[in-house]
Amino acid sequence: MAAPEAWRARSCWFCEVAAATTMEATSREAAPAKSSASGPSAPPALFELCGRAVSAHMGVLESGVWALPGPILQSILPLLNIYYLERIEETALKKGLSTQAIWRRLWDELMKTRPSSLECLGLPALEASQRFRSISTLELFTVPLSTEAALTLCHLLSSWVSLESLTLSYNGLGSNIFRLLDSLRALSGQAGCRLRALHLSDLFSPLPILELTRAIVRALPLLRVLSIRVDHPSQRDNPAGPENAGPPSHIIGDEEIPENCLEQLEMGFPRGAQPAPLLCSVLKASGSLQQLSLDSATFASPQDFGLVLQTLKEYNLSLKRLSFHDMNLADCQSEVLFLLQNLTLQEITFSFCRLFEKRPAQFLPEMVAAMKGNSTLKGLRLPGNRLGNAGLLALADVFSEDSSSSLCQLDISSNCIKPDGLLEFAKRLERWGRGAFGHLRLFQNWLDQDAVTAREAIRRLRATCHVVSDSWDSSQAFADYVSTM
């Protein structure tokens, strides 16, 4: 049967390129060919020469290549670079061609230059390519990803339905984060997608962290665990470049975030005030949230922080654990009291949050009163807040006879506590006859200043709770001590 006209025309066009390429190659290699005709390596075949020429001139020939018949296109695909391989993907699929083996080979080649990254993948090597897609956990820690490597990874991710957990840590993604978001959106649309945990951290991001978070939860509505950290404020890879004029509109759209399945959200923020409404929009769409952790978050005012807390109370009724680290809450005392009165939270962490920097004499009794009336709270972690002896003794009243508190875990590490204050705290617990209340953490306090008294205090406390302490040299904290004098 005669070939269709379109087939014939495109085949002839391909042959013209082949002929021109062959003449050029022949004239260039004629001399060496005469002297080494009997050598082990034969000159490249006509078709391969043609394919190389087409691949080298794709900028001009791209539309013609896309129109080639399937059998010819199939032989050209392995010769294309990653950029054009991705662009031709859709056309190849329409012609019944698969590029999966090519992408797998490219990934193998990229990883050969980074032996340590193979260990991150959880396999001794990627030579067993047929097992690649069965991997359920992928972790890449501090493996620099060039644009080529990122493009390969994103292509694999777009259909990696067996993947359950993905960790990308300090890979220098830059603007390739947009490709990652597109591939994750494509993966989410695949039947049988199992991705439920995403851990993403980097020095910089072309998107502000809250916009990035919104984009992720929109792309992956079935995600259960999201941990995201950006160390420095948002910046473009090349602000002057036209290709970096801004992120794609479908990634940072203003439309409302659909309801998602997030149960655990951890965010580490760069310096600078964060827009509370953006965070609230994520929280409102995360009705199943059980655990929230905010690290180094800064808001423009206590009112903005209060807006976040009010959103948690109204929309996140399943929230059990709440953690704040390295946040200045000295001016947010009423908001802290609001949290301590929340009867759904079971564990609250205020780590290095400067809680008692202002009005300690007034705030501590208010805080204790709120905790005495809360029978739901089981764990309170207060490391690094300069509680001191006076603050510890005030806190002891939480365990008094008239308290309704069910607190069973208390962390008062790094709080400038001295042995005599700890001993008096132990005596008060004994006086009130309080039963065992669980765990008490005492790391990095000033207990080495009087080892005998410290040992006596810990001995008494162990009759009431499980004490976890250390042998810390408090001379390291001299500067902190001077600042509290």
Image (cartoon, rainbow, N blue to C red):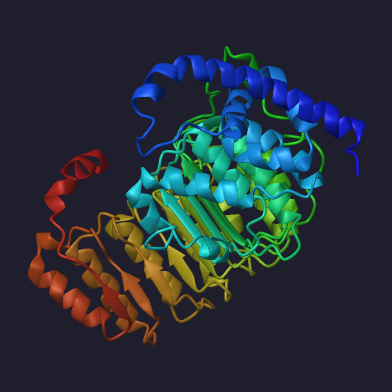
Instruction: Indicate the quadrant containing the C terminus: top left, top right, bottom left or bottom right.
Output: top left
Q: Nearer the viewer, residue 331 or 62?
A: 62
Q: Does residue 357 appear anywhere in the picture?
A: yes
- Report the side of 469 relative to 66 (left or right): left
- Work out whether 260 lies above or below 458: above
- Report the side of 384 relative to 313 (left or right): left
- Work out whether 198 lies above or below 45: below
Percent position (x, y) of residue 321? 55, 65
- Report the side of 176 relative to 354 (left or right): right
Name the residue rendered at 80%, 31% in the picture. Answer: 67
- Work out whether 124 lies above or below 94: below
The answer to which quarter of the image holds residue 50 is top right
The answer to which quarter of the image holds residue 438 is bottom left
Name the residue rendered at 53%, 37% in the picture. Answer: 298
- Work out whether 385 lies above or below 161: above
Name the residue rendered at 69%, 62% in the picture. Answer: 193
- Report the side of 343 relative to 481 (left or right): right
Name the residue rendered at 44%, 35% in the picture. Answer: 42
Percent position (x, y) of residue 63? 77, 25
Percent position (x, y) of residue 143? 40, 43
Q: Does residue 136 appear anywhere in the picture?
A: no
Percent position (x, y) of residue 192? 72, 66
Q: How many marks?
A: 0
Instruction: Indicate the quadrant containing the N terminus: top left, top right, bottom left or bottom right.
Output: top right
Q: Nearer the viewer, residue 200 or 230?
A: 200
Q: Nearer the viewer, residue 351 or 447?
A: 351
Q: Single out the residue that lies furthest toward the top.
A: 240
